[in-house]
Image (tube, rainbow, N blue to C red):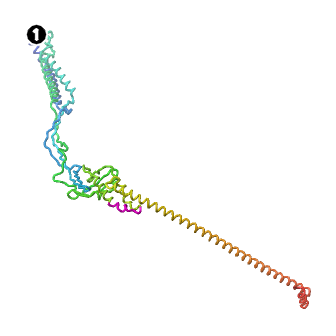
Amino acid sequence: MEIAVGLGENPKMATAAMGASVKEQDPPGRHRCLFGTRLVSLAVVMALAGGCSYQRGRLVEQSQRVLREDDQTLETAEPAIEVSQMGSELSVRAEEVCQVSRQQHVEITYSYARESKIPVQMALMGVGGVVAGVLGGLFVANVFDFPSKDSVAPGDESSLTAESAVAGGVILLLASIAMVGGSAAHFIGLLPRDEEMSLETIDLGPQGSPAPCRPRRPLAGATVSLAPAGASGPVVLGTLDSDGELAVDAAMVVPAALALRHHRPFLPILVDGHSGSGTLELAPLRSHLDERVWAAAESTRCAAAEEPSDCEGLETYMQLFPDGAHAPRARSILESANSRLAQRAARLEAQRREREAAQQAEDLRLRQEAERRAAAAEQQWRAEQEQLERQRRTREADAAARQRAREAEAATRRRRADCRRQCAQSCSNDSACTASCVQHQCH
């Protein structure tokens, strides 16, 4: 409007000026249009590129849908053990226990929020679009009064005309729309959620209470034993038959020492190492052993005992069963037998002492007799030794006399020989003279 009014004051000049302006402004207008087109294209490209600039964010929701449920019957670790006892007779019955386990097959849906990879760039593009829109609106509305009144003159070569301002404003508006639209489309694209589905199996665990398996599953061949605390090892009672049952006389299997000395009135029963609620009561076994040991004690023999060994069985019974069913009677028999054995022992002791005294006297007599005999033998031996010594001395004296006689005879022969030599020398070997000399001088 202002431009029209301004030109209306001088129509001829306006016409000439507009003609010259149009002719001179065409090339610059085309350049502005090209620049604006590029700006719009860039905004569109950025808006389209923003649609690929998302990434998966945090998990905001998770839902699941049950597809089906499966039940599976499984054997439990602990079997069912039934124990019954009548006296020392024990019956054990064991079978497998089953438990229903349930599994749930579900489809799980995970919803994730979207996050922008370029939130700052998109925000700046939106702000830039708003600014471009404001500027474009200002140019289209000719707020800057292009061209100004005082600049309008014939032959004006200014390239900034009202038409170019409107064209530039339109271009800025288009760029604003593209940029703001692209930014808005990018941030609106954050509203949808990325969903991911998976199939999973959830174990719901055991359902209900364990119960014996149906059909029945006996523990055939399982070992039945007792596990007393502190013992060196288990006591095997036997093995289960094909029906999973065992009947045994515990009194014939359980050691007597274990039944009598165990500090508890019962023993737990194990089946292949599994302990149930069944136990073996020891009172019937102890009662049974009481009768067996009493029968083996031979109380009548002890009642008529002649030796302490006759009451060993009854003493063993009292050691094992000091409070047993037959303890009062056993105690009475032992007291009577011990009194009688004590009297007998005193009598035997007196007899032993008498025998010992007689034996000592006999030993003394024999020792004295032996000493006497030894003294006589020693005296005789000494006499014999003295006689032998005298004989030895006599023999030595005789030998010395004989030696002296031999020596004297030898000396006489030597003297006679010397005498004969002297006679021969003096007689000048005259035989008659020599013989006469020898006869008279050599005696």
Q: How many residues crowd around disc 1 within 10 Å: few (fewer than 14), some, or many (20 or more)? A: some
Magenta residue check for 381: no
User: Secondary structure under badge 1?
Assistant: helix
Which residue is nearer to you in this view: 228 or 69?
228
Magenta residue check for 305: yes
- Image quarter for residue 30? top left
Query: In the picture shown, does residue 374 fall above or below 97?
Result: below
Query: In the picture shown, does residue 315 fall above or below 425?
Result: above
Q: Position of residue 185 (x, y in %)?
A: 14, 27
Q: Position of residue 289 (x, y in %)?
A: 31, 57
- Image quarter for residue 113? top left
Q: Quadrant of the N terminus?
A: top left
Q: Can I make out residue 146 in this image?
A: no
Q: Position of residue 406 (x, y in %)?
A: 79, 81
Secondary structure mostly seen in the magenta stretch: helix
Per the image, the residue denoted by label 1 is: 6
Which residue is nearer to you in this view: 16 or 167?
167
Q: Amino acid at mark 1?
A: Gly
Residue in view at x 86 percent, y 83 percent: 418
